Image (spheres, rainbow, N blue to C red):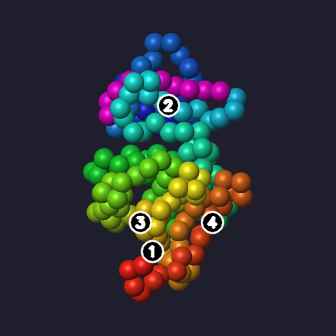
């Protein structure tokens, strides 16, 4: 996670330096978190081992978010990582503005229930924010038809399953055919 609370102020991991006597808290669940810094990754905050908060991220998730931000910059769009939206208590992976429209971009690497996906989408819609989901590599091999259906999106007038290609550092829209009957 890119942000934490310190002295009731939201701070960014990239701006923090490991210091003794600083106690950070998760803005989502309020539990203590710690600053992780290293030469092989960007700084981030992590929960301690026995945390039950779902704000922890894998290295693949962090890499994908960073790539999405760079890709958006190459398109000429500014982006913001981990912006907390207090009204709906959500934190999109990346928030960008394209043609006067705010868009929340989610890079989904871990399992997500249909119920939670709908809640998140409804939260963005409530604020007038469009949303786009990109699936991570874990979804490439274990995506059953009913699970794929929850992530289908229109792209260039075609129904697609949107993946983020980590090796090419860009979106990969896989076209899907829509069947008229109920066969799988």
Q: For the residue labelled by badge 4, is the local secondary structure a helix, a strand or a loop?
A: strand
Indicate which disc, 2 or 4, sits on the residue closer to the N terminus.
2
Q: Nearer the viewer, mark 3 or mark 1?
A: 1
Disc 4 designates what residue? Answer: 172
Label 3 environment density (alpha carbons within 10 Å; few <14, some 14–19, many ≥20): few
What's the distance in space between the residues labelled 4 and 3, CA to CA? 20 Å
Disc 3 designates what residue? Answer: 146
Q: For the residue labelled by badge 2, is the local secondary structure a helix, a strand or a loop?
A: strand
What's the distance in space between the residues labelled 2 and 4, CA to CA? 29 Å
Indicate which disc, 3 or 2, sits on the residue closer to the N terminus.
2
Indicate which disc, 1 or 4, sits on the residue closer to the N terminus.
4
Disc 1 designates what residue? Answer: 184
Q: Nearer the viewer, mark 2 or mark 1?
A: 1
Disc 2 designates what residue? Answer: 45
Q: Are dots 2 and 4 in contact, CB under 8 Å?
A: no
The residue shown at (50%, 60%) is 143
Residue that extends furthest to the front in the rendered view of this protein:
183
Q: Is residue 37 magenta?
A: yes
Q: Which of the two residues, 147 or 64, is positioned nearer the viewer here?
A: 147
Decide if residue 33 is in sight here.
Answer: no
The residue shown at (41%, 66%) is 146
Q: Which of the two residues, 154 or 42, is positioned nearer the viewer here?
A: 154
Q: Is residue 136 left or right of residue 55?
A: right
Q: Nearer the viewer, mark 2 or mark 4?
A: 4
Residue 19: x %, y % from top left: 53, 16
Indicate which disc, 4 or 3, sits on the residue closer to the N terminus.
3
Provide the residue span drawn in magenta: 29-38
Q: Is residue 132 above or below residue 108?
A: below
Q: Main SS type for the magenta part?
A: strand
Decide if residue 36 is in sight here.
Answer: yes
């Amino acid at each position: 996670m890119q942000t934490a609370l310190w002295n009731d102020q939201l701070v960014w991991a990239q701006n923090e330096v490991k210091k003794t006597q600083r106690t950070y808290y998760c803005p989502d669940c309020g539990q203590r978190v710690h600053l992780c810094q290293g030469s092989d990754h960007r700084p981030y905050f992590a929960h301690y081992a026995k945390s039950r908060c779902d704000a922890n991220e894998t290295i693949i998730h962090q890499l994908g978010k960073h790539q999405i931000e760079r890709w958006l910059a190459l398109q000429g769009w500014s982006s913001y990582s981990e912006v907390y939206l207090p009204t709906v208590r959500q934190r999109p992976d990346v928030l960008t503005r394209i043609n006067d429209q705010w868009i929340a971009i989610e890079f989904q690497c871990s399992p997500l229930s249909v119920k939670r996906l709908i809640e998140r989408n409804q939260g963005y819609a409530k604020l007038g924010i469009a949303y786009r989901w990109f699936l991570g590599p874990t979804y490439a091999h274990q995506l059953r038809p009913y699970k794929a259906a929850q992530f289908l999106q229109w792209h260039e007038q075609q129904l697609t399953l949107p993946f983020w290609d980590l090796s090419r550092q860009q979106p990969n829209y896989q076209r899907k055919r829509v069947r008229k009957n109920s066969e799988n």
